[in-house]
Structures are given as structure tokens and as C-alpha cells.
Image (cartoon, coloured by chain):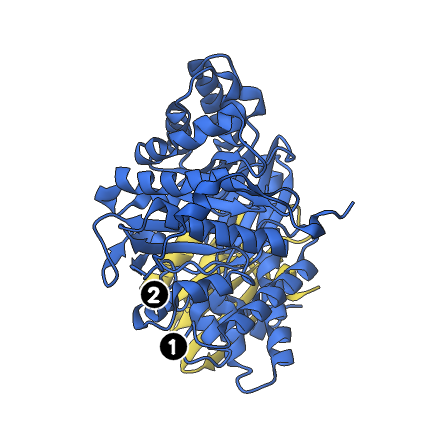
Amino acid sequence: MASEKNTAVISVLGKDRTGIIAGVSKLLCDNNININDISQTILDDIFTMIMLVDLKDLIIEESDIKEQLDKLGEELGVTIAIQHTELFDRMHRI
Amino acid sequence: MITDFEILETMKMFNEQHLDIRTITMGISLMDCAASTVEESCNKIYDKICRYAGNLVATGEAISKKYGVPIIHKRISVTPISIVAAACGATDYTPFAKTLDKAAKACGVNFVGGFSALVQKGYTNADKNLIESIPEALASTEFVCSSVNLASTRTGINMDAVADMGRIIKKTAELTKDNDALGCAKLVVFANAPEDNPFMAGAFLGPGEPECVINVGISGPGVVKTALEAVRGQDLGTVAETIKKAAFKITRVGELVAREASQRLNVPFGIIDLSLAPTPAVGDSVARLLEEFGLAECGTWGTTAALAMLNDAVKKGGIMASSYVGGLSGAFIPVSEDEGMIAAAMSGSLKLEKLEAMTCVCSVGLDMIAVPGSTTAETISGIIADEMALGTFNNKTTAVRLIPVPGKDVGDMVEFGGLLGSAPIMAVNNASCADFIHRGGRIPAPIHSMRN
């Protein structure tokens, strides 16, 4: 579906440890993905980080970005998901 | 700007509350596949399904990856085979079922629906052939689903067909007895069958539908239950409002996926079917959702009222979210596919008669209910007749998917596996209704059918 903007939400959930933000940021930088916004909190003892990223020309389903994030998530012991922002716009806005 | 709360709420819906797109179902018209021989017709059907649905699975997987939304099934529904096969000259339509099965395997889908006939007012010769072919067709295929529409509010109830289907269900059970009568899990009879339903076993592409169409079925009883947990003790107006909001969000996910699938496949978008369809997984149960209203166990007094409200509020929320809501849309109450229903049936709180009452206000009918193998064909027809009457006289869709398991009786369990789950054999009132069923003929359409 044609979208006005090609942005995605990357969410990281899991046990806090050093190097999570560094690891995710490096991976995104290596893929030429720009971070527009980042927030981090500890919710019910779970480390929660939400990033809003600009994918530019990258198409999630035609790239291996999801697989790269899955692998990094395994190494860091956290769950990392990438989802196109259109999903959230459609679900939460009339 | 989407807030962190909304993002986390969405993540929890998918990760913890089992929200998923249950099925992307591609409807394919087979009207142009009629031919004067079985072989020619089957070749046309196979080629056409593979041509249209060849990319269906890959497209579903790409959309799933883009949005991080689980898409459980990719399926196909086709024109009722009794219409397509009418010109072929043969009386055994099993080869058509085998062709559908082969095409489903080639496309990588896990079900194809449409080994069907619409006989609410009477039989064509082809309808009769199709119905007689159902047991063998379901016993000799893996992925084919069959449905028969026996009644409608406009036409009344075809009681000859009701009588026949009791016998056909028994025969299907007998032919698939080595698998606990699994064939019956792929066979459903309807009153007022929707022609755009994406859910199995009842999916087929009605004669008024386009050449090819994408219909999407979306589920999520866990999401609604979690939403209700936040308003415990509050009045029922608040409960209705909460269900509507959850249904709105769920339907929006479905519409996003449906529109994207439609665009990628270059096929028109038909409808979203928002049906709270349970699975045997804990946390994905309609029974547990009903219990969240304040009921100790599904099946106790108050269950029908809660289900009526749930079904209605789901539709209202869904309609706000998409202009094209269709199919069955509401709450399914299959017994074997719902962890809470299984528990309630085993404890004795949920009985067949209560389930029948619940079907007056749910979106479908008596679904995935195992009964003793000794239940007679006439008694099964009697159960069907009652259910058809509920649909016909109350202007709603009703259905029956009963499984009379050979060699098993009340107290036994049957395991169907996977999403079909497991079920305790439920007790049936066996007082004879045979003389009623053997009368045959048609129950006339109700007075409120005269609306023109």
C-alpha cells in the first residue's frame, strides 16, 4: 500500500543489560536507517525501548532487516520487532 | 504521533493476547470452468486456481513481515462445485474434490472451501450428486471443505435436504472413523449462508460474487478479554463500549492487511470478517471472555445474555472501523477449538441445549461438537432442523458442524489436533424425531420473509 512516509517502529523488550541501545543503533546505522525518535523505560521490570526510524528506501519485507534484528535480539537476550508505522496509525487513529 | 502506550498496547495484543489475522481467503469464481467432461472441467479448475492463487501465500508472508502481524492461514474459496460440475455428465463429483485438493497443495494453502451446494429451496440434479459425493470426497482429500445451505429466511427450510444431510454426516463419520470422524470437521450445513465468508469449513464464493476477491478473517478474543479485565465491576454500558473499542482496533488491522493484499495481488478487496474465533491455546478463548463478564463458568445462566451483548458490540465496533464488514462477523462458539468451552463441557456446565440457545445470538451455530457415534441420522437431522429454524425464523446465519464419532460415547474424548482441538463427547437427547424428519417437504418461509 502506498504510504506517505516510509517509517517503522522498532521495539525492544527484555531484561536490561549494557549495550542494547549501542547494539541496535549500530545495526541501524550499518543499514543506513536513521533514528528519528527514541524513548526508553523500565515497565514492570522489563526494559522497553521504542524507536521511530526513517527507513528511506528500505522495504522491510524485501530486505533482511527483520532477520538481522532477530539475530541481534538473540545475542542480547531481548525481543526486537520492526513494524511499519502504518499499522499503528490505522489501529489507533479514526 | 503515536504514543509509546499505544505501541506497547499493540505489541501486547500480538505477543500476549493472540491477536492475529486468522485468514486471507482468496475467492475464485469457477463459473467458466464448467465443461462437458469431468477431466476437462477439472483441468480448467486446477489451472485457474493455480493461476490466480499462485502468489497468495508469498504475498501473505510479505505483509506479515512488513507489519509484524501474524497471518495464520492463506486459503481459497470457490464457486459451489454443484454449479461448476452440473454440465460434466458424471454423477460422482469426488474427482472435483481431488482436483481442489491438488490445487490447494500446489498453491501452499491449507484449506479450500466450496465443495458446496445451495439447496435452500430444492435440489438440482447436480446438487443431489454433490451431496451424495460428500462422504467420499472428504474421506479422500486432506484440504477440501464442504458446505451445504439448507435454508434461508426468504425460502424456508428444505427438509428433504435436512434429512439427507443427517445421513451424509453419518456416512462421512463412518468413512473417516480411523481419524475420529475428522471428515465431519470439514463439513458444515447452513441457514442463510453468507456468500463472502472467509472462514472454514463454510467458505465458498457465492454466485453474486466477483471473478476474484480477497476476504480477510480476523480474530482476537484474547484482546477483548484483556480490555474487559480493566473494567471489572463496572456497568454493562462500559463493557459494551470497551468491546467496541477493542473490536475497532482489531478490524483496522484486518482492513490494512486486506487492502494491502488486494493491491499486491491486483484483486478487489471484498470484506473484513471480524469474528472472535477461538483456538485451543490458553488466552484465546471465547468462553473465558464470556466468563470475564462475571460468570463462574461458560454455560451458566447469563451466558446467552453476555454472548448477545458481545456479538452485537463486536459488530458495532467493526462497522465503525471498516465500511466493508461482512461474512459472519461476531463471536464463534466452537466447542473443540476453545479451551474454556472444552472445560465447561467437561464439567457439565455447558450442554448441547444451552449451546443451541447461545446460537440464537452468536454469529454462527452449533460448531465442532462431538456426539456419540450411536446417534442416529434422524436425530442429527432433528438437531439440524432446530438450528435451521433458529436461523430462518430469526433472520440470521446459523450452522451445524457435528461430529458423531463412531465407537465413542459420552465420557470419551476425541483429539482432532491442531486448531481443531479436542472435545468431550456430549450427551444428546435421543427421543426419536424420526417420524418428523421422514415427513420431508419444505417448511414454508416465515411471514417476515415477505418484505418486498
Chain identity of mark 2:
B
Amino acid residing under circle 2: Ile
Q: Residue at x 65, y 79 (%)?
A: B237
Q: Are marks 1 and 2 in contact (CB under 8 Å)?
A: no
Q: Nearer the viewer, mark 1 or mark 2?
A: 2
Q: Is residue B198 left or right of residue A3?
A: left
Give the label on residue B353, or none: none
- Mark 2, secondary structure of its residue: helix
In depth, the one of B108 and B299 nearer the eye is B299
Check the image and name the residue furthest to the right: B452
Q: Which residue is mark 2?
A: B342
How many marks the image carries: the answer is 2
Q: Is residue A18 visible?
A: yes
Q: Residue at x 37, y 56 (%)?
A: B369
Which chain shows up in yellow?
A
- Mark 1, secondary structure of its residue: loop
Which chain shows up in blue?
B
Give the label on residue A16, or none: 1
Q: CA distance from mark 1 to mark 2?
A: 40 Å
- Position of the N terminus of chain B by quadrant: bottom right
Chain identity of mark 1:
A
Q: Residue at x 57, y 75 (%)?
A: B5
Same chain? Circles 1 and 2: no
